[in-house]
Image (spheres, rainbow, N blue to C red):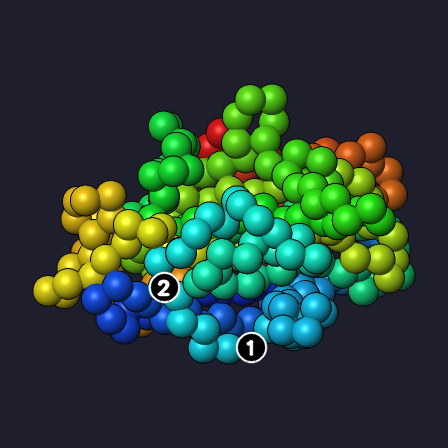
Amino acid sequence: MKKKLTAIFLCVALVAIAIVGASLAYFTDTDNATNTFAVGNVTIKLIEEERDGNGGKKDFTQDKKLYPIVGSAQGEKDALGMPTAKNYVDKMVTIENTGSEKAYIRAYFAIPSALDDGYETFNAGLNVLHFNFGNKVGEDGTVTSTYGVEWNWKHGDKWNYFETTIDGIAYNVYFADYYQAVEAGATTEQLVSGVYLDKSFDMKDGKCYAFGQEVTLDEGWNWNSVSCPVFAVACQAEGFDNATAAMEAAFGAQYNPWGTTASNWQ
């Protein structure tokens, strides 16, 4: 008996629109695959939300415009635990277990290498495109990060990381395992909360700049089609002690959901 696996694919398309700005649009697609493990019904759903302006949340809306951040995305937070900095683009991503069985969940976040400092040096302050890890708000209003707590982005002192090429563009891929099996009908804490352009970002004469120097883009780069995809996978929890063991058994130790050649696994 085969089990079903649902993989959710989310694209974040960056489109240049002005000297100091870019446009951001998201597209969602769903792909069904069949795992070789035998057990019931394992499916997941990627949930995308943003602030509704009234202290609550609503479904994410398309065609957001992305401008360099004004203020600090790590600074003051509102009642939802979201940054109050201007030009921060909400992207509250959670994953729901919509099946009938407990499931382990892994999520991948891919950033164009040209916009990311990468693993070797990994200085987040040098990223052109930033994303914030997810937040959660306690009963007392305290805001804490899900990084390294609910979502495990590292093994030891190394990032879960590899490099690949998607549609001709080089990407740095970071991935995280949820800390425990997710019960049927339950939803994870936030994976990420949003994205933003570095405050140093600028565009002029058909080129883009950050940190006072030109950003070297891949050959064939097109701001209208370059994306930041998020991909989530799940497999049965039964028989496994943790997400890493389950994922490696289900997909292999170096699984690349985009099916392209990958390198520099960490």
**Residue tagged 2:** 67
Visible in this render: residue 103? yes
Q: Which mark is residue 100?
A: none
Visible in this render: residue 32? no
Residue 67 or 98: which is nearer the viewer? 67
Q: What residue sits 37% from the left and 28% below the top?
A: 120
The residues bearing labels 1 and 2 have C-alpha atoms spaced at a distance of 17 Å
| Secondary structure of residue under mark 2 | loop
Q: Is residue 90 left or right of residue 121?
A: right
Q: Residues within 10 Å of mark 2 (few under 14, many from 20)?
A: many
Give the percent coordinates (x, y) of residue 20.
26, 63
Q: Is residue 48 left or right of residue 188?
A: left
Give the percent coordinates (x, y) of residue 87.
44, 63
Which residue extends farthest bottom?
62
**Residue tagged 1:** 61
Return the disc, 1 or 2, that comes first in the chain's sequence: 1
Q: Amino acid at mark 1?
A: Thr
Total marks in image: 2
